Amino acid sequence: MRQHDVPGPQQARRRTGLRRSLTAAGLGLAALALSGCAGRVQDGFLPAPVTENGTHVVRLWNGAWIAALAVGIIVWGLILWCVVAYRRKKDDTALPVQLRYNVPMEILYTVIPVFMVAVLFYYTARDEATLLNTSKEPDVVVNVVGKKWSWDFNYVNEDTYESGTQAELTGQPGVEKDLPTLYLPVNKRVEFVLTARDVIHSFWVPAFLQKLDMIPGKVNKFQVVPTETGEFKGKCAELCGAYHSQMLFNVKVVSEADYQAHIAELKAQGNTGQLDNSLNPEKLVPEDKGLVPSAGSK
C-alpha cells in the first residue's frame, strides 16, 4: 500500500467529525419530527378524540398506517433479499437469466394492489358515511357562518346568535379571550349547518378530528357528540384570503347548565333572532334553502 493511501490523523479526525455531524443532524431531524406528534401512540399521534366520531377517524387512520407498514416491510424485505441473493459475484461473467412474460406473476402484481385499494376504499367509504350521517335528531343545531375573516354562530333552537370579528394577532397573551367562542353542551348531539358569506372556508376543530368545507351558495352539515368538557381551538382549514391565518375561534364544551347560562347571557345582550344568510353576497341555491334552519331576523 502506498503511503498516501493510509489515512493520516487529520483525515481520521475529519471522518470522525463528519460522522458526528451526520449523527447529530439525524437526531435533530428525528427530534423535530417527533416534536410535532402531540398525541398518543394508540391514537396514531392524532389529538385524543373528544367526540364519538373521533374514534372512527382514529381507527381508520391506524388501520391505514398498519396496512402501509406491512406492505412496506414486505417490499423492503424482498428488495434486500434480491440485493443479497442475486448480487454480482467475482466469478460472474454474464448477466443472470432474465425473466420475461411471466403471466401468473403479472396477474399477481395486478390483483394484489387492486385488492388493497378496494379494501381501503371500503373502510374509507364506510367511515365517511358514518361521519356525515345526519339522520339522527340533534339536541342542538348551530348554523356556523364563515366570513372573511371570522365566524358567526346561530344557535337555532335557542333563537340567539353570536357574531365574531377578525382576530388581531399581536403576539401578546390574551388574544384568545377576544375570539368568537362556540359553546356546546357535553354528551349532546350537535348538528352544524355550515354556510359561507363570501368565499370557500372550512370549519375545523382539530380535537374533533373532523372538518367540512363551507361553500358560498351551498349548505353542508355534520353532527358530533362531544364526550369531554374543556376548551378547544378552532380555525379555518381552507386558504380563504389575506387574513386566513387570523380566522380563529374558541370552542367550549360545558355542562348543560353552563350552556343554558351562556344562551341566557347572549339574549341579555340583545342577540335575539338569527343572523340572516341573505347577508351573503351569493344567495343560496334553491335546492339548499330548506337546509338552513334559521329564518333570519337580523
Image: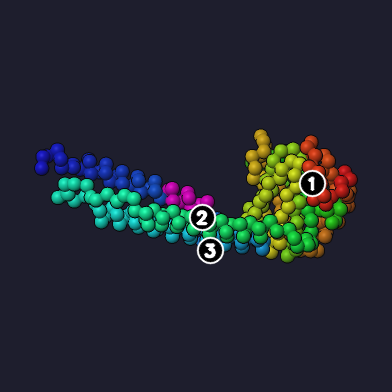
Tell me if I can see residue 254 in this picture.
no
Residue 61 appears left or right of 150:
left
Q: Residues within 10 Å of mark 2 (few under 14, many from 20)?
A: few
The amino acid at mark 1 is Glu
Residue 117 bears which disc, if any? 2
Q: Residue 48 appears at what percent x and percent y?
A: 60, 60
Q: Nearer the viewer, mark 2 or mark 3?
A: 2
Q: Residue at x 44, y 53 (%)?
A: 110
Label 2 with label 3: CB-CB less than 8 Å = no
Q: Quadrant of residue 238?
A: top right
Residue nearest the observer in this picture, 206 or 191: 191
Label 1 with label 3: CB-CB less than 8 Å = no
Q: Residue at x 66, y 58 (%)?
A: 129
**Secondary structure of the residue carrying numbered label 2:** helix
The amino acid at mark 3 is Gln
Q: Residue 150 appears at what percent x and percent y?
A: 73, 42
Residue nearest the observer in this picture, 77 or 248: 77
Q: Residue 89 appears at what percent x and percent y?
A: 18, 51
Residue 34 magenta:
yes
Residue nearest the observer in this picture, 290 or 101: 101
What secondary structure characterizes most of the magenta part?
helix
Circle count = 3
The amino acid at mark 2 is Val
Precedes in sequence: disc 2 or disc 3: 3
Residue 69 appears left or right of 297:
left
Q: Residue at x 63, y 56 (%)?
A: 128
The residue to which callout 3 is attached is 42
The stretch of residues the image draws in magenta is 28-37
Residue nearest the observer in this picture, 17 or 94: 94
The residue to which callout 1 is attached is 287
Quadrant occupied by the N terminus: top left
